[in-house]
Amino acid sequence: MRIGIVGGGAVGLLTAAYMSQSAHVTIYTRRHEQAEKLCANGLTVIYGDEKTTHRVQATPFVCETNDDVLFMAVKQYDLTNIFTTHVHMLQANAIIFLQNGMGHIRYVSHLPHKHIALAVVEHGALKVDDTTVVHTGVGQTKWSVWRGEQHAFSFLLRTSSRFPFQYVDDWETMLLEKLMVNVLINPLTALLRVPNGMLVAHDPYRQAMEQLFHEVASILHIEQRERIWQHVQTICRQTAANRSSMLRDIESGRRTEIDAILAYVIERANEQHISAPISTFLYTLVKGKELEGGKGR
Amino acid sequence: MRIGIVGGGAVGLLTAAYMSQSAHVTIYTRRHEQAEKLCANGLTVIYGDEKTTHRVQATPFVCETNDDVLFMAVKQYDLTNIFTTHVHMLQANAIIFLQNGMGHIRYVSHLPHKHIALAVVEHGALKVDDTTVVHTGVGQTKWSVWRGEQHAFSFLLRTSSRFPFQYVDDWETMLLEKLMVNVLINPLTALLRVPNGMLVAHDPYRQAMEQLFHEVASILHIEQRERIWQHVQTICRQTAANRSSMLRDIESGRRTEIDAILAYVIERANEQHISAPISTFLYTLVKGKELEGGKGR
């Protein structure tokens, strides 16, 4: 079986490593340099004291893919670019989307693929260099069929116990829950420069997060508010020492996923003519930090 | 003429230095140690390359003052403490308040003093140590009589051209304008850890400041909105390289003036049953940073 992974970031590399245990994996990277290094050195996963190197194929994403299944593991803003100009290159029988947020759903319906799945990755992963990823926290990848049949993805059942997949029926609830987690944890930790745990351990930050929660939950018509609010706090406690991906992006002067996450919420508010003062204020501040880049810090 | 200055912070020391050129000045400090050092070493003002040391009296604020005029140069939160327990010690014919915010006005009406003035300090001042203050920016001190007669403060006209006083008729507008400047510049610079100029030079930050401006202007029923909004931006540009006092407080793990500034705005909103989402969110975040103290940074 041939599996293609589009994207050589932390999530792409982690997925590629575990998939390569039972399939022929090709990683499609943005940069030539990363593809060359992956072909030459293999892909290394560090988990605790354990270090495993996997042989993988890698090629820059400039020509057509040729796989049975494609994992789309690029950030949402890169996905927009791919859908706009390179969608004909995504040759595969089945395709799985691993993006945060919900903004990518609008593109999915235009795709020609017979089987389409949506997934959310709940692992901790940190890319160390072009060929090395640290598996910092074992979680699961929830997935749901958006179009086509579940059995087209049956290979997901054969993966390592350290990289399990869990099927859920309702893709919208799955994505909404992940979106809520990302909306509440990522921008605040990035702005305050604190690890995830501080958002619940430090009372004023928990109050600020709760203010944001109520605003966003209203905009997105979240049902079972109390359950979701508890879920978000549990994630903060379980990943207490982690620095969120958005915080790491800000610290490294990289582009963040703030548009996929908070701009999406603001758009939904605008559509409904609801005001979103806190989301808008927070979005502007984080966007400012992002554009500040390496300057002034 | 005997002038007492209650408070040995940047504003107190700066005022004491310039007042000591034409009057007998006593500084009332919180700590014994500072009073001893001031008596022994004098009070030094640094302005550009110029360094001037003034002889002053200093004593801890534990016994009655005995002056013609008192300048109250403590932070608003310390003023609350003084008014609650030590108000009988403030013996003077006239008294001038130099606090930021407007929360102290409620106490002023209970004072026995015949002549009461309110003032706002628009100088840049940085306390280097217990006996040294740097005059980083020459501005003016606006003042207005709250009770009594203007001539009781006529000595203010005789001060140095580097420390001018300007009389204004309307104390409420004077304090409101200063409050707006403080509300807009201090919490945002403290949270974002940027110098004042970034709030206008960096588009997303200016947008965030404008969002906050509209919310607060509504709560405080600010007239002439456009003029005040331009005024705030002008101050940001004129003090572009300055790090605000609240930013410096946060960086040093000291208590900030967030309660005198933003909590006052939130209280006013609550009284009127108006929501203040951005002010509340920003207050909580800055309060969190303040309570974090030296930790996690």
Image: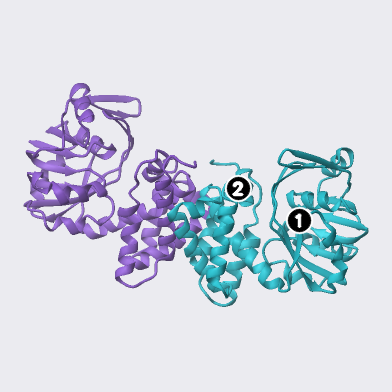
Chain colours: A purple, B cyan
Comes first in the chain, label 2 or label 1: 1
Q: Amino acid at mark 2?
A: Asn
Closer to us: mark 2 or mark 1?
A: 2
Q: Residue A249: horizontal and vertical position, in percent?
A: 37, 42
Q: Is residue A220 left or right of residue B17?
A: left
Residue A253 image-quadrant placement: top left
Compare residues A127 and A232 and report the one nearer the observer.
A127
Dot 1, crowdedness within 10 Å: few (<14), some or many (≥20)?
A: many
Name the residue at 47% across, 64% down. Answer: B211
Figure quadrant of the C terminus of chain B: top right
Pick whichever, B43 or A231, lies toward us.
B43
- The residue lying toward the viewer, choosing from A194 and A111, is A111
Extreme-bottom residue of the structure: B272
Disc 1 marks which amino acid?
Val
Q: Which residue is mark 2?
A: B242
Is the C-beta separation of discs 2 and 1 under 8 Å? no
Identify which residue is drawn at 28% across, 50% down: A100
Residue B184 visible from this viewpoint:
no
Left or right: residue A168 versus residue B78 is left
Q: Which mark is residue B74?
A: 1
Instruction: Write down the chain letter for disc 1.
Output: B
Left or right: B105 as drawn, with respect to A170: right
